[in-house]
Amino acid sequence: MLSKNLLRPDVAEDETMEDLQLQGLRLIQKKKAFRFGMDSVLLADFAGIRPDDTVTDLGCGNGILPILLKGRNKGKLFFAVEIMPEAAKLAERNMILNGLEKDVIVITADASDVGRYIASCSVDAVVCNPPYGPPEASLTSPNKEKARARSQQADTLDRFFAGAFTILKGKGKIFLVYPAPQMLSVMKKLQEHHLEPKRFRLVYPCENKAANLVLIEAVKDAKPTLHPLPPLIVYNPDGSLTKELKSVYHIEEQTGF
């Protein structure tokens, strides 16, 4: 059951609490740690997850994806896997805050070790918003938690995709968001782990700019056939959100405009 309680919980001085504008859901975030952005919202909207599916979020951070998916009636039981203990504890607090502690099981572990905690071939879908930045990036954050959330190691994708393959059922699906310029490399990496890309959608900031994100759906042990979807454009020429982005954020439902 989603929480409708609007009482303010205990929030530390180094934290903020966000109203997600969806089913009364809220999220506690650390001010100086990794904070969720539009990519998580787009991924939750893109993911083709059924109401009764069992879902695993690899690298769940503060737990934003399971919360957004539950708010959209996508998925019944969730495993939220996070390697950073502090982030995992925050994810647990966010589940309690929203009354989802019985629906979302938080596991502190590396993505490659999920087979120790989740039965093999038992999950219908995996969602994944993996770190984007290369480890040698010059602007890596001095905050260790934020740096780890943003910067991948040489084997990050291998660990995520190997874990996904282990726990996914036959023909189970993985949904992820990634930088558009690296679309080819991430698709090849999925194929190496027998996760065949089937659908993708490019996200453009506006019509006259290059795509900056790609949303990908891959299927375990599927035959290679790739289906491009219509582009998703974030902003109109005047800087306002496009009608589709308002729909993704449920803005028209909230305001009536």
Image: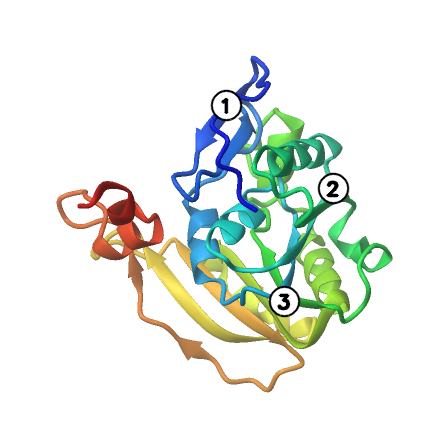
Q: Tell me which amino acid carries mark 2.
A: Ile
Q: According to the image, label 1 marks what residue?
A: 7
Q: Residue 114, position in %: x, y? A: 79, 56
> Which residue shows up at 56% across the image and 84% down it?
224
Sequence-first tag of 3 and 1: 1
Check disc 3 and report the residue beneath it.
189
Q: Gap in Å between the C-alphas at discs 2 and 1? A: 30 Å
- Outermost residue, left side: 238
The image's mark for residue 83 is 2
Q: Is residue 217 left or right of residue 57?
A: left
Residue 161 image point, x, y percent: 68, 63
Answer few, some or many: residues within 10 Å of disc 2's Cα (few below 14, many 20 plus, some between 14 and 19): some
Q: Is residue 149 above or below residue 213?
A: above
* For residue 88, above or below residue 195: above
Task: Indicate the quadrant where residue 133 lies.
Answer: top right
The amino acid sitting under disc 3 is: Lys
Q: Quadrant of residue 218?
A: bottom right
The image shows residue 112 at horizontal and vertical percentages of 78, 56
Give the side of residue 239 with respect to residue 57, left or right. left
In this rendering, which labeled residue sits more in front, label 3 or label 1?
Answer: 1
Q: Secondary structure at mark 1?
A: loop
Relative depth, front residue between 255 and 85: 255
Crowding around mark 1 (Cα neighbors within 10 Å: few <14, some 14 to 19, many 20+) is: few
Q: Is residue 61 above or below residue 139?
A: below
For label 2, the SS is: loop
Amino acid type, mark 1: Leu
Q: Position of residue 230 (x, y in %)?
A: 31, 70
Q: Regarding mark 3 in the picture, which secondary structure is present there?
A: helix
> Would residue 33 be visible to someone looking at this image?
yes
Q: Which mark is residue 128?
A: none
| Disc 2 from disc 3: Cα separation | 21 Å
Badge nearest the viewer, 2 or 3 = 2
